[in-house]
Amino acid sequence: MYHAHVYFDLSEQNQAQSLQQKILAEQSGQILRLFSLVPRLVGPHRKPMFEIHFSEQQSDFIDWLDKARGELSVLIHPVSGNDIDDHSEPQVRWLGEKLGVNLDKLR
């Protein structure tokens, strides 16, 4: 399984909501679950975000997401059960600006 975290500033919340709607309309068959926007800092994340779960590193979905995300940054990582490894290089892939993750929150 993989997670994608789509990051946004509060001023970009409408853009993030539009992207969620577009994912549901155009890519619902590619995802396992789409979570609500979290308009505050949570866990190791440095910006508000919403999360997408998908079963494997689907290049078609990732390419689509890269084109659809606009200026929003996206962190993609595997889910192995080791949160620190999953959120660290070389496991992660970034679409857009690399924001980093606060790994201390995972310890």
Image (cartoon, helix red, strand yellow):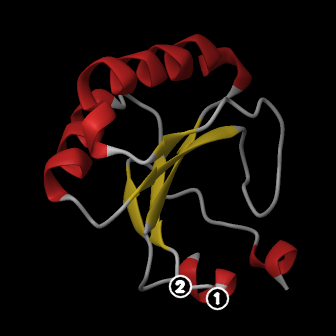
- Residue at the left extreme, as displayed: 60
Residue 82 - label: 1
Quarter of the view holding residue 94: bottom left
Residue 70 - label: none
Q: Residue at x 38, y 23 (%)?
A: 24
Q: Secondary structure at mark 2?
A: loop
Please name the amino acid that badge 1 sits on. Asn
- Disc 1, disc 2: CB below 8 Å? yes
Q: Up-down: is 27 above or below 56?
A: above
Q: Secondary structure at mark 1?
A: loop
Percent coordinates x, y for residue 75 in the rendering: 48, 57
On the rendered structure, is 37 left or right of 42? left
Quarter of the view holding residue 13: top right
Q: Residue at x 24, y 23 (%)?
A: 26
Q: Which residue is mark 2?
A: 80
Percent coordinates x, y for residue 50 in the rendering: 61, 38
